[in-house]
Amino acid sequence: MSFRPVLSFLEEDKIGTIQPHNDALLITLRIGDYDVKRVMVDGGSATEVMYLDLCKGLGLKPKDLMPYNSPLMSFDRKLVILIGMITLPIQTGPKIVEVNFIVVDTYSPYTAIVGRPWLYSLGAVASSLHQKVKFSSRDQVLEIHGCQPTARQCVVAAVSHRLNAEFSASAEENL
């Protein structure tokens, strides 16, 4: 009979976080052979997304990507330019999970987004409130801690980018 630890979040899991907050859960993951920062965990996402800058940073070439033709909408409800799809390993502690990333060419303060497929294949539970991802490995519960300061920097970067884009569009209209 095997023992499987219970994945739960307690009040003490908030220790070390700034409370109250509404920060996104940003973590560092080992994707391929690289530790990748600014990966957003989004339990509402049905797919994993990799932004083009990370794709280039990992040394991937267009020939490494498989075609992918399904539409994808961004947070601001605009269609996103899809470059392709690639399967890469994500190592989380002793577990390695193969993940299909859709590579997109659009601005994001994040390097990647992992969603339900990654969480489910890892058997993980994420809590943005507690700024943690928990999963069992053998007979123990392992944790990945989020980085609230980085999440807040990403919000500032996203707002700044949007304001700059709006200002540029407005300036072009006035020409």
Image: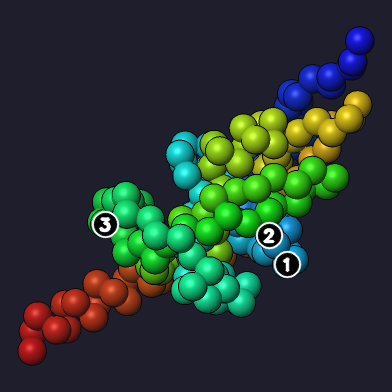
Helix, strand or loop at label 2? It is strand
> The N terminus appears in which quarter of the rendering?
top right
Labels 3 and 2: the sequence-earlier one: 2
Q: CA distance from mark 1 to mark 2?
A: 5 Å
Q: Nearer the viewer, residue 42 or 48?
A: 48
Q: Nearer the viewer, residue 14 or 122?
A: 122
Percent position of residue 55, x then y: 54, 70
> The C terminus appears in which quarter of the rendering?
bottom left
Amino acid beneath label 2 = Ile
Amino acid beneath label 3 = Leu
Amino acid beneath label 1 = Tyr
Percent position of residue 29, x then y: 70, 56
Q: Is 49 above or below relative to 131?
A: below
Left or right: where 174 falls relative to 91: left
Depth-wise, is mark 3 or mark 2 nearer the camera?
2
CB contact under 8 Å: marks 1 and 2: yes
Q: Is 57 above or below relative to 103?
A: below
Q: CA distance from mark 1 to mark 3?
A: 29 Å
For residue 7, which quarter of the picture? top right
Residue lying at 69% horizontally and 52% vertically, measured from the top left: 90
Label 1 sits on residue:
34
Label 3 sits on residue:
79
Residue lying at 85% horizontally and 45% vertically, measured from the top left: 94
Instruction: Categorize mark 2 by other alpha carbons within 10 Å: few (<14), some (14-19), many (20+).
Output: some
Instruction: Categorize mark 3 by other alpha carbons within 10 Å: few (<14), some (14-19), many (20+).
Output: few
Q: CA distance from mark 3 to mark 2?
A: 26 Å
Left or right: where 18 falls relative to 141: left
Helix, strand or loop at label 3? It is loop
Label 2 sits on residue:
31
